[in-house]
């Protein structure tokens, strides 16, 4: 049997559905960015990303249509307001795409391994490649402009060594100095701070323009949480005389006019929060210093209820589109 005639599995349906939500959200951001972008190179990056994203959405629509499935609503032109003042300044567009490309590359690579039909595996393989290309474009552009801070340099290792003391695992010993961070721990901390800085500006901008009072308060809470993550993890670098990443670009302006619907802004906040939990889990899993592991877990414990509160706001306002559900056999077998 041709693999294209095999029905979609539940994981394939769910992952295609989530990809449709994310990609239609990205289209709305790109439409807004294209309206305000002045730099020619940024315009080219935005336009190529828009065309690629639109093609991806059309591919998912085609698959759903072939399977006789309803097309999700996702995010439409009603979720972006054109002709409003610019909410983010100097070079925020490529900084935003740089952040989103990290999320996409991780998600689509995972979705590919959860897919069994050949055409679906191929689709997510292509989406992963496109996300990596977007990351390369934005990273190189930002490096050339001097606004993307590289992780700290270190002396090259000259010999193989092995851990000989169990204190290597501890960060709480009051009788001796805490060991310096290793390269793996530094890379994970830098990644978390770098992504969080872009997300923090997003929260600041959203807090300024949100229409609903509870939504506005939620984004203010997001601002505070982002600041806590950045300062907490940054202190670990400072303890080893390493300056945390920072940039002068991509700040929120003083605009108070919303370029997006509250629904869209809530969605991407939920997406970033979920990605942050995954990043903290990764950081904790690969850290061998117990104090850093505990800190990652503590930060995660604050992000989880934040996401839950966001979900309640989405539901209360009728903004949470329900993902495809398996048949409720208990309900169907009721007499």
Image (cartoon, grey):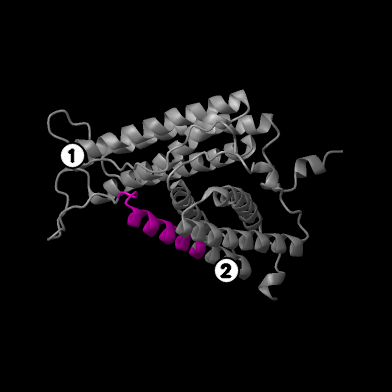
Residue situated in front as seen by the camera: 98 or 127: 98
* Residue displayed at 16% across by 58% down: 156
Q: Quadrant of residue 52?
A: bottom right
Q: Residues within 10 Å of mark 2 (few under 14, many from 20)?
A: few
Residue situated in front as seen by the camera: 201 or 222: 201
Q: Position of residue 318 (x, y in %)?
A: 71, 34
Q: Which mark is residue 241?
A: 1
From the image, which quarter does the N terminus lie in? bottom right
- Decide if residue 117 is in sight here: no
* Residue displayed at 65% across by 58% down: 57
* Residue displayed at 22% across by 44% down: 181
Which span is picked out in magenta?
129-149
Q: Is residue 285 above or below residue 119?
A: above
The residue under label 2 is 122
Q: Position of residue 108 (x, y in %)?
A: 52, 58
Kindly report which numbered mark, 2 or 1, lies closer to the viewer in this rendering: 1
Magenta segment's dominant SS is helix
Q: Quadrant of residue 51?
A: bottom right
């Amino acid at each position: 049997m041709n693999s294209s005639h095999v029905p979609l599995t539940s994981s394939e349906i769910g992952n295609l559905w989530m990809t449709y939500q994310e990609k239609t959200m990205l289209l709305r951001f790109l439409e807004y960015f294209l309206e305000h972008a002045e730099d020619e190179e940024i315009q080219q990056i935005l336009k190529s990303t828009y065309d690629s994203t639109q093609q991806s959405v059309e591919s998912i629509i085609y698959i759903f249509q072939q399977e006789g499935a309803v097309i999700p609503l996702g995010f439409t032109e009603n979720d972006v307001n054109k002709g409003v003042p610019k909410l983010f300044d100097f070079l925020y567009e490529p900084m935003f795409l740089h952040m989103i490309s990290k999320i996409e590359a991780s998600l689509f690579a995972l979705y590919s391994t959860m897919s069994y039909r050949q055409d679906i595996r191929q689709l997510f393989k292509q989406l992963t490649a496109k996300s990596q290309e977007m990351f390369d474009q934005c990273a190189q552009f930002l490096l050339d402009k001097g606004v993307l801070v590289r992780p700290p340099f270190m002396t090259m290792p000259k010999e193989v060594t092995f851990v000989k003391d169990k204190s290597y695992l501890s960060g709480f010993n009051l009788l001796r100095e805490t060991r310096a961070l290793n390269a793996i721990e530094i890379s994970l901390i830098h990644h978390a701070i770098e992504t969080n800085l872009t997300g923090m500006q997003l929260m600041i901008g959203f807090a300024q323009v949100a229409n609903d009072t509870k939504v506005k308060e939620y984004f203010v809470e997001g601002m505070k949480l982002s600041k806590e993550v950045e300062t907490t993890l940054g202190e670990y670098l400072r303890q080893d005389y390493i300056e945390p990443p920072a940039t002068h670009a991509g700040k929120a302006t003083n605009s108070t006019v919303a370029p997006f619907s509250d629904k869209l802004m809530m969605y991407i906040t939920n997406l970033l929060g979920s990605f942050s939990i995954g990043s903290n889990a990764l950081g904790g899993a690969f850290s061998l210093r117990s104090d850093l592991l505990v800190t990652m877990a503590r930060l995660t414990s604050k992000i989880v209820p934040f996401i839950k509160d966001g979900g309640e706001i989405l539901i209360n306002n009728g903004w949470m589109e329900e993902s495809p559900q398996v048949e409720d056999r208990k309900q169907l077998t009721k007499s």
